[in-house]
């Protein structure tokens, strides 16, 4: 479903044209609905990680390692990190998250205990700090696997009218329904409860769909008897 079709569905659901439910308000509601659906998908997904299909690259970020520099900026579109690797000069190694409150160690004590074979990191907002501090420059020495924000619709996308949401088309109508509920609240439309019921039903199907996509993954349960004698 294209953005034009989604906007047409909003008119269908609400009975309101753009003279009442304006184009700018519709766009805001569409993008809020897109973000809400994204959060549902991320909370539900199995080993098959979701990524907005409108991107033309993978959600893997690279940046150079710089000698004596311990802190680096994370990608602006990062939603959450999945894995972080660092190369101190001998190949990429998985870094482990560090919480100083859990270790009861000071930062200087942590630096004394870590090594390039077993690196750690801490995240502060959009900044990541590595332990130990690099001692050499390494091209693409940091690699971050992450979930990123969806690519929001813009005024230009509305003008063109052909862009589609970057998730399975089975659920494109979710955006139109959620945006129509916004209008229902604002303008007290008579069907806002019906729309809410439709939304709840669709959210259940979305959670089930994205929670069980990797059908090739097989689970095996076996009996295990522990001998304590």
Image: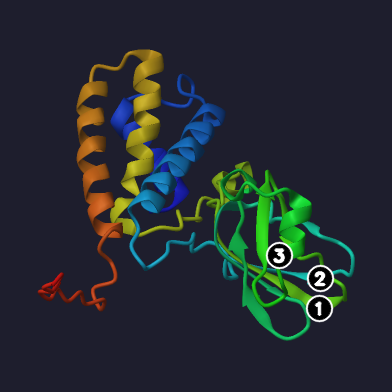
Which residue lies most toward the top here? Answer: 188
C-alpha span from label 3 to label 2: 21 Å
Residue 188 horizontal/vertical position (percent): 33, 13
Find residue 209 and report its image quarter: bottom left
Which residue lies most toward the front here? Answer: 229
**Numbered label attached to residue 139:** 1
Q: Residues within 10 Å of mark 2 (few under 14, many from 20)?
A: many
Q: Is residue 184 above or below residue 60?
A: above
Q: For the residue labelled by badge 3, is the local secondary structure a helix, a strand or a loop?
A: helix
Q: Is residue 73 visible?
A: no
- The one nearer the camera, 73 or 179, is 73
Asked whether the beta carbons under mark 2 and mark 1 sit within 8 Å of each other, the answer is yes
Left or right of 193? Residue 54 is: right
Find residue 221 and report its image quarter: bottom left
Pointer 2 residue: 65
**Numbered label attached to residue 113:** 3
Residue 99 horizontal/vertical position (percent): 60, 49
Q: Residues within 10 Å of mark 1 (few under 14, many from 20)?
A: some
The residue at 49%/64% (across/down) is 53
Q: For the residue labelled by badge 2, is the local secondary structure a helix, a strand or a loop?
A: strand
- The one nearer the camera, 1 or 56, is 56
Left or right of 116? Residue 35 is: left
Asked whether the beta carbons under mark 3 and mark 1 sit within 8 Å of each other, the answer is no
Upstream in the sequence, badge 2 or badge 1? 2
């Amino acid at each position: 479903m294209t953005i034009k079709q989604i906007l047409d569905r909003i008119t269908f659901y609400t009975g309101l044209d753009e003279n009442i439910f304006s184009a700018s308000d519709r766009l805001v509601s569409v993008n809020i609905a897109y973000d809400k659906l994204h959060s549902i998908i991320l909370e539900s997904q199995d080993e098959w990680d979701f990524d907005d299909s409108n991107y033309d690259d993978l959600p893997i970020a690279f940046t150079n390692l710089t000698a004596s520099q311990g802190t680096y900026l994370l990608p602006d579109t990062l939603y959450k990190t999945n894995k972080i690797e660092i190369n101190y000069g001998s190949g990429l190694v998985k870094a482990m998250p560090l919480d100083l409150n859990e270790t009861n160690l000071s930062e200087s004590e942590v630096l004394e205990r870590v090594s390039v074979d077993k690196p750690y990191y801490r995240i502060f907002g959009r900044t990541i700090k590595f332990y130990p501090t690099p001692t050499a420059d390494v091209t693409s020495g940091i690699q971050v696997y992450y979930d990123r924000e969806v690519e929001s619709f813009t005024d230009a996308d509305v003008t063109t009218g052909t862009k589609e949401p970057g998730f399975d088309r089975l659920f494109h109508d979710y955006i139109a329904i959620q945006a129509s509920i916004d209008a229902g609240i604002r303008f007290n439309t008579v069907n806002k409860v019906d729309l809410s019921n439709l939304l709840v039903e669709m959210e259940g199907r979305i959670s089930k769909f994205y929670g069980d996509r990797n059908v090739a993954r097989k689970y095996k349960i076996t009996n295990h008897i522990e001998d304590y004698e």
